[in-house]
Amino acid sequence: MNNTERLEKLCEILDELSEMRDDQVLLVEGMKDRTAMYLAGVNGKIVAVQAEGGPLRVAERLYNEGLSAIILTDWDPKGERIAKEIEHALSAVCVIYDTRIRAKLCSVCGGEIHDVESLPSFYSRLASEAVRRKEGRNI
């Protein structure tokens, strides 16, 4: 996938996140990830799992509030471990969750970045590159 296609796919993913339903919460690892999502234009309910007492506490809160989750942890080994912990906690209290957006981001980022915190700068780089290409300048 070339960088123009990556930018298009990344925009689609960010649009999808921006259109979260009112009964959905985006679960990220920490506060920097939460800030990155806001910088990327995602304005729904975003919860930093580590800052809110960990996966079990967040799962119980979502259950009590009747909410579902979109899990968006980093796609490095630590993020993978945390995603599994969150999945296990949500399953334990029968909260519906979605991991497909995380999988899409992992695919789109193609090894260039491995964390949610880097998404705004990755987007900016791809967008700047697209503008330069459109203007006919070399990168």
Image (tube, rainbow, N blue to C red):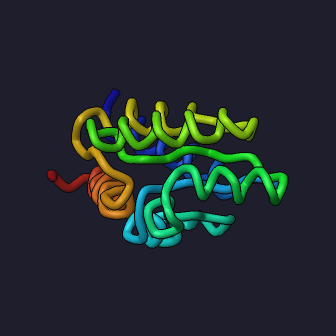
Where residue 71 appears, as percent x and y from the top left, is 55, 44
User: Along the horizontal axis of the image, is 90 left or right of 32?
Assistant: right
Please tell me which residue lies in front, 54 or 31: 54
Residue sitting at x 46%, y 69%? 51
Residue sitting at x 24%, y 35%? 111
Residue sitting at x 22%, y 42%? 112
Q: Quadrant of residue 127?
A: bottom left
Where residue 58 appears, as percent x and y from the top left, is 61, 57
Where residue 139 appears, as percent x and y from the top left, is 15, 52
Please tell me which residue lies in front, 14 or 136: 14
Please tell me which residue lies in front, 92 or 51: 92
Residue 135 showing in the rendered view: no
Residue 127 showing in the rendered view: yes
Image quarter where the N terminus lies is top left
Residue placed furthest toward the left? 138
Question: Considering only vertical position in the picture, is 133 above or below 9?
Answer: below
Where residue 106 appears, as percent x and y from the top left, is 38, 35
Please tell me which residue lies in front, 93 or 25: 93
Residue sitting at x 64%, y 69%? 43
User: Along the horizontal axis of the image, is 46 left or right of 95?
Assistant: left
| Number of disc labels | 0
